[in-house]
Amino acid sequence: MSRVVVSGRIPADGLAALQEQHEVVSWDDASGMPRAELLRRVAGADAIVSLLTDQIDAEVLDSAGPQLKVVANVAVGFNNVDVDACKERSVVVTNTPDVLTDATADIALGLILMITRRLAEGERVIRNQEPWKWGMFYLLGSGLQGKTLGIVGLGGIGAATARRAKAFGMKIAYSSRSGPKPELADELDATLLGFDELVATSDVLSLHAPYSPATHHLIGAEQLAAMKDSAYLINTARGPMVDESALFKALKSGQIAGAGLDVFEEEPAVHPGLSELDNAVLLPHLGSATVETRTAMAMLAALNTNAVLAGQAPPNPVT
Ligand code: GLV
């Protein structure tokens, strides 16, 4: 029997799909094993089913040992896994694409509505029992209709976000490091722009590229200065794609109109100034957080693990 280490609590169906075939070492805390525990428990593992909060690096791989065959990350992003170190050790890395596309796009659209229509601000008024009354100019936001949504990275989640935004009457533009996406662009009537032009012309700029050293601080002081002062930044991808302290300064000084963030540079820490700003909407990394999606992610990670351990090609290798 193979030994599978699951680094944190995952939905029961996914765990059962692993337990049917393997000896499973699991961990009951859904936010993951402490590092020392992970290093200790992976010893002798054939597979590691990891969460995005685990750093799966050379130290973890070496603690596991040479029999390790697969790291199945329960996330679409896999920047927490040192893929090169895995390759050097012939360890396959898999992720969970597609199953979280709709859930994450829902959150992106949710953030767009929350920030442009000032929903969180309004909710705080009621929740804090502040006096209010209807007024012609009270808490006016900004409409989406006819505005341009700039999608940075027109992959599955970017396209799903664009589809939703089109239903709200937005025009779609996109930039793409991997070249034009003619089919999606056709479907969405989306205009391909260079990254700098997209940044400068979007009314709402939404990040959907994978995080890597190449996309670290993709949005920094320079890009924020280039954005329209009426524009909003949305990030449901990975926190370090945005220079959070530059963003704080841009929001505080009114250089851009607002930001909706589901991810942060140093999760779970958030730049302390951001939560004091009314023009920032902040969510605690909820992109894929639905019962259905998390179940599907766990099932897919189990499928990938089981395939590799059975000597088959997994459905979702990352390279
Ligand atoms: C969530 O952030 C994921 O990458 O799945």
Image (cartoon, rainbow, N blue to C red):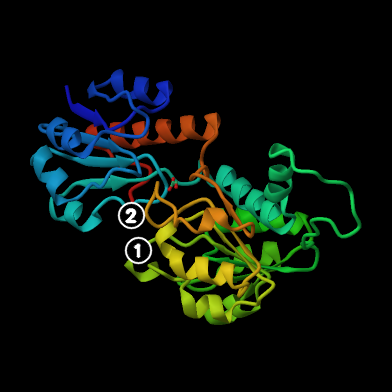
Q: Is residue 194 visible?
A: no
As displayed, is residue 77 above or below residue 295? below
Residue 214 position within the rendered picture, expressed as x and y whole percent measured from the top left: 36, 70
- The residue carrying mark 1 has its beta carbon less than 8 Å from ligand 1: no
As displayed, is residue 182 above or below residue 201? above
User: 153 and 211: which one is in front?
Assistant: 211
User: In the rendered picture of this protein, how many numbered marks are placed on residues?
Assistant: 2
Report the residue marked by disc 1. Answer: 212
Indicate the quadrant containing the C terminus: top left, top right, bottom left or bottom right. Answer: bottom left
User: 37 and 195: which one is in front?
Assistant: 37
Task: Report the disc number at residue 79.
Answer: 2
- The residue carrying mark 2 has its beta carbon less than 8 Å from ligand 1: no
Mark 2 belongs to which amino acid?
Answer: Asn
Q: Earlier in the sequence, mark 1 or mark 2?
A: 2
Residue 306 position within the rendered picture, expressed as x and y whole percent measured from the top left: 29, 31
Secondary structure found at label 2: loop
